[in-house]
Amino acid sequence: MELKEILSRCDHTLLRPECTAAEIRALCDQAIRYGCASVCIPPAHVAGAKKYVEDRMRICTVIGFPNGYATPAVKAYEAADAIRHGADEVDMVVNLGMVKDACWGDVLDDIRAVRGASEGKILKVIIETCLLTEQEKVQLCAIVSASGADYIKTSTGFSTGGATFDDVALLRRCCDRRVKVKAAGGISTLDDAERFITLGADRLGTSRIVKLAMEQETA
């Protein structure tokens, strides 16, 4: 698989809490230069990034991040506010306490609240696979498929683990075909990125792939 194809599926990501406006602008410059799918950045940086890139790059941000335990109303407000400031895509974290309590109707309502606030924009649902049992992952595939969300996403990158090949294969197998898969967290090599795509990931949440492209240019 050509590097250009891999890059076109990357959400070039910077979500460190201390990241600066200058770092976000540099991230945007890199994403534009290398043809990434989007930049994924904290909500507080959305307005500035949108003003900086205009229509040259899609802006993605995170909702209920990284713990997912805000109320549905708060998450919906976060999403609406981010979109008002220029976000093209939102990646929300599910309420993992509801998942562990098997309150599946509440989990669905939580996602649908954000879906309602983000109509017309891409919605990705982060399920934090490293904290889930196999059955919980399968159940969440059904919930996300029923919610109207566009993607199911493996990880925040802020918990105990990131994307695995087995999890991406499982999510692709168990979700409706309409729902796409985003692998995120710990993607550090081109071989791994290609394998995630081959297993069914449509997007990759990573900062490493652009860095590898930059290293190849200077090698």
Image: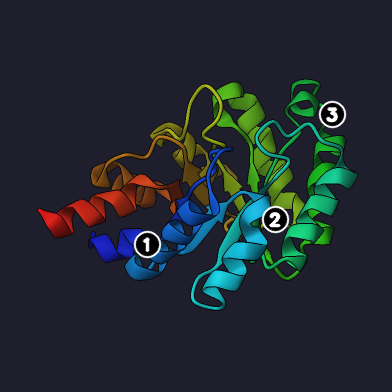
- Residue 59 as seen in the image, left or right of residue 213: right
Q: For the point 72% across and 65% down, which residue is it?
A: 85
Q: Tell me which residue sits at (68%, 52%) in the image.
A: 44
Reading the chain from its start, which is encountered first: label 3 or label 1? Answer: 1
Residue 103 circle label: 3
Q: Is residue 78 above or below residue 87?
A: above
How crowded is the residue under tag 3: few (<14 C-alpha within 10 Å), some, or many (20+)? few
**How crowded is the residue under tag 1: few (<14 C-alpha within 10 Å), some, or many (20+)?**
some
- In front: mark 1 or mark 2? 1
Image-based side of 98 in relation to 18, left or right: right
Q: Residue furthest left?
A: 219
Residue at the disc numbered 2: 149
Task: Specify the amino acid type for callout 1.
Answer: Gln
**Mark toward the start of the polypeptide (1 vs 2):** 1
Q: CA distance from mark 3 to mark 1?
A: 41 Å
In the image, residue 71 lies at what x, y percent? 87, 38
State the image coordinates of residue 2 (x, y, percent, origin top left): 23, 62
